[in-house]
Amino acid sequence: MNKGFKDAVVYQIYPKSFMDANGDGMGDLQGVISRLDYLKELGIDVIWLNPCYKNSGVDGGYDISDYQAIAPELGTMEDFDELLAQAHSRGIRIVMDLVVNHTSTEHAWFVESRKSKDNPKRGFYVWRPPFEGKEPNQERSIFSGPAWEKDEATGEYYLHMFAKEQADLNWENEAVRREVYKMMRWWFDKGIDGFRMDVIDMISKPAAVLRADGGPHRSSAHGPREHEFLREMNREVLSHYDAFTVGESGSVSVTQALEYANLDGSELNMMFQFEHVEHDAGKDTKWSTGPMDLVKLKHIFERWQNGLHGRAWNSLYWDNHDQPRAVSHFGCDREEYRVRSAKMIAACLHMMEGTPYIYQGEELGMTNYPFTDISQSRDVEAINAWNELVVEQKKFTPEYMMACIRYKGRDNARTPMQWTAGENAGFTTGTPWMCVNPNHTAINAESQVGDPDSVFSFYQKLIRLRKTHPVIVHGDFTLLMPEDRQVFAYTRQYEGKTLLVACNFSCEDAALDELAETRGEMLAANYDEPGDKALLRPWEVRVTLV
């Protein structure tokens, strides 16, 4: 198990949208290699690489058809080996995505599994007979619609908690687990440094989800053998390597995270939880137009900071490939406040206890895309939701659904990285696979690197502070002004040092109470002038050391 995860800062790369080296309009591994010096200059320690395996092209690489082959559109295994060597030569570790809740229906295992009921690979997936001529039960896919798909060859249904092209593996089958562990060892022996584990909380299914009894929709996560499987994975694979590990769970609680990410090293280093990014979700659906509830958000962070302190470890993130752009979700992407709020939300997060994750373009203050029509979307989740909520159920109007997609859609994170103000944002010399945000002329890396006032330079400063002040890594957490609807302020304390962080999440001036007033050495701020110690200006942040 990895010992250096507490001090690390991670940078997430969605390869398809990061940098295109061959001009075909799609990002690739050579493109990532060409930007390693940029990442080294930023100061990060680890790259989390979204899936670059061979896949069926349905869900952004999360529909894997071969775990030990590189997607041809992204490059070759030789390209990957070069990326690994080049990153390591710069002191940067590479963490891969481990997607083992499901495979593509094009995977060789599933191709065999669907041939007949007595095929040796049949038990690699979850198959059930119909119930009264319909789906085995009423389980719902996270991507809308039934979670069961009928296969005409045998007349049975297979389980897919995501797209129908993503069949769930049957982790109850020991042969499946052996194959997964063998694959993981293959990657570690190649030299990778760890895994981010996609929906790892779903590998063990609750019994009710699996019964062909027509039963209702149930939670498909945290099944009875979940921790047994992860401890087995740890014994068989992870404990034999210096492995950086983070698990994803859409429903994990603080109490559950204490078991997944406990500090005894028997399972994983840390977990991704979704509570803070989904605090403004709609009723029974993620789709909404907000607004953000700062009081609710603060208490979520407080619960996780204090609940895990000394017992487990937090992951810190605002956005990723599954979330909208952070500055559009939690800050303000209006021109007069975008830079200021991008810096503020960065400091608010990076000064907490946990491992920070920076999603590509976040360090530039990239924003959501101004989508106007569903035809612009490439995301299977958004397209399926449109078909269900607008076309079939008529629950949402087209205008409201598009507003939801502009605010919450995953495509916002997947528009090409903005390198320059030139054509296609410098991402490609060809036709980009997805629309480039028109604001790339104002928001791009070329204009920010070397500019001391840029969002990029502010992220560099935050990373340096984490590596300089132990209180940022190890300190406890105390929330100040807990019910204030503008101010998010807290202290961190460790070995006689106190870090005070005060953030204004609004476009108006905000008063600070006595405990949150500015004092001590100023470590970071997003206004040049000192200002009133008891008053924060719009989207202001002050980080001081006492």
Image (cartoon, grey):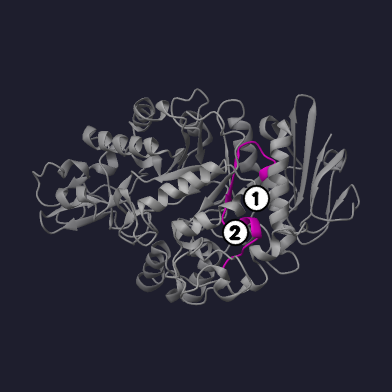
Determine the image quadrant of residue 45: top right
Count of marks placed on residues? 2
Residue 280: image x %, image y %? 57, 55
Q: Which residue is mark 2?
A: 361
**Earlier sequence position, callout 1 versus callout 2:** 1
Instruction: Please state which of residues 497 and 188 is positioned toward the viewer in this rendering.
Output: 188
Residue 218: image x %, image y %? 34, 45
Crowding near the residue tagged with mark 1, few <14, some 14–19, many ≥20 C-alpha atoms within 10 Å: many
Q: Which part of the image, by quadrant, shows the C terminus?
A: top right
Residue 12: image x %, image y %? 53, 50
In front of the other: label 1 or label 2?
Answer: 1
Q: Are marks 1 and 2 in contact (CB under 8 Å)?
A: no
- From where the camera sits, is residue 273 visible? no
Badge 1 marks a residue whose secondary structure is helix
Which residue is drawn at the image coordinates 53% and 67% (left, top)? 427
Badge 2 marks a residue whose secondary structure is loop
Q: Which residue is mark 1?
A: 42
Q: Which residues are magenta?
A: 350-369
Whether residue 366 appears in magenta in the rendering, the answer is: yes
Crowding near the residue tagged with mark 2, few <14, some 14–19, many ≥20 C-alpha atoms within 10 Å: many
Residue 98: image x %, image y %? 39, 44
- Left or right of 234 in this view: 335: right
What amino acid type is highlighted by mark number 2?
Gly
Instruction: Please state which of residues 131 and 383 is positioned toward the viewer in this rendering.
Output: 383
Which residue is drawn at the image coordinates 63% and 48% (left, top)? 297
Whether residue 488 appears in magenta in the rendering, the answer is: no
- Left or right of 128 in this view: 453: right
Residue 303 vertical position relative to residue 295 in the rendered view, above or below: above
What amino acid type is highlighted by mark number 1?
Leu
